[in-house]
Image (spheres, rainbow, N blue to C red):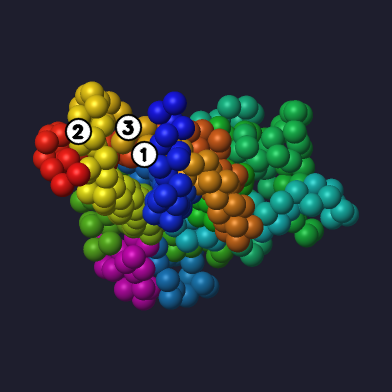
Amino acid sequence: MQIGLILAALQRHRLAALMIALEIALACAVLCNACFLIAERMQAMRIDTGVDEAALAVVRLDGYDESRATDLNARMLAGLAALPGVQSASAINAVPFGPRAGTAGIKLDPEGKHFGGVVDFYVGGPGSLEALDVRIVAGRAPEAGDYQPMAGFLPSDASVLVTRALAEHLWPGADPLGREFWMSDWHYRVVGVIDHLAIPAPGSRGPASTEWSVFVPARPGPGLTGNYLLRGEPGRMAAIIDDARTLATRIAPDAVLVDEESRTLGELRARYFEQDRDMTGLLVGVVVALLLVTALGIVGLASFWVAQRRKQIGIRRALGATRGDILRYFQTENFLIVTFGVVLGMVLAYAINLGLMQRYELPRLPAMYLPVGAVTLWLLGQLAVLGPARRAASVPPAVATRSV
């Protein structure tokens, strides 16, 4: 009976109730999608690259004479390996969160009829795979005879290791060891499987291809020069990279040190996800502001209705209604408005998500975010109306009915 009376009373204030319901619907839709985006970005920032980031750094040179690559590598690798705290120094073309150096499409047959996808090639000299400290789950690590000379940005024929994710994509349910793939006329055979190794730009081609990585052993020289991987004591990597940058300018004065890319992997990770952190903070701010505006709207409406129905409240109190009855009345009324807004907001949330999926290739909004948004707004609504409802319940009947 009370719900029926409340609905009848809301008919007299249709516009105000509808405005609050629409505000709640918009808040629900934005809240669900914003929380989903925040969760997606936070998950992306927690990505496991598969390498020992705390113990790794990279030094990058540019502007060197390619014809003197062998000499430059020899000088740099010897000098870097001799630095205090450095455990190994090796040549590599790329590292996670660094610039891309070997992105290409591959084919699963020599005729090129079966396209395998776009993958990232890590090309590393002796010691580089051990420095990365990746876990090999099948097959073997590269042997001395596997390190082939470069024929451009890759060796033209090599024994390689692929990640578990890439192997499952290329040969689902089959043993990848011994499998072959091609890139134009260049030929590669799989001798090992790596548990995890993220591509240099994780997430750039979507979450499915984050670990589509291939490790190719190669001899340092023309085509594999100027990018050096350092492994050292985790607590000393900041000092090691400072020493390495100073050493590089002294050993190779004819080359240019790329300072922004000569960093520890921890620094590269922080810089890579800088925009994601900023966007996450912005989305959190939007959510907080939206919830605050929604709460203020509910408080304003409830306060207005308390003032408008002051005499009605007094009459009800004079007829025997308790403070609890008045409090429950306003909270029930608010719950009905919020419920209508939440139902409308769920539909709007999916509509917004469909637009984001088409425009930004985001995944579908999981259903779990809808009840989370609904419960949040229900609690917010009840807390926001509590103050005005308590003030309404405390109105003395004699005061409220003085002019009746």
> Which three-letter amino acid code belongs to the residue tagged 1?
Asn
Which residue in the structure is indicated by mark 1? Answer: 334
Q: Label 2's element?
A: helix
Marked residue nearer the N-terminal end (3 or 2) = 3
Residue at 64% x, 29% y is: 139
Marked residue nearer the N-terminal end (1 or 2) = 1
Image position of 51 (left or right of 246) = right
Disc 1 from disc 2: Cα separation: 15 Å
Magenta residues? 247-262
Q: Residues within 10 Å of mark 1 (few under 14, many from 20)?
A: many
Tell me the mark number nearer the camera, choosing from 1 and 2: 2
Residue 54 location (% of width, % of height): 32, 41
Q: Quadrant of residue 358?
A: bottom right
Tell me the mark number nearer the camera, choosing from 1 and 3: 3
Is residue 294 shown above or below 340?
below
Residue 365 location (% of width, % of height): 56, 43
Q: Residues within 10 Å of mark 2 (few under 14, many from 20)?
A: many
Which residue in the structure is indicated by mark 2? Answer: 393
> Which three-letter amino acid code belongs to the residue tagged 2?
Ala
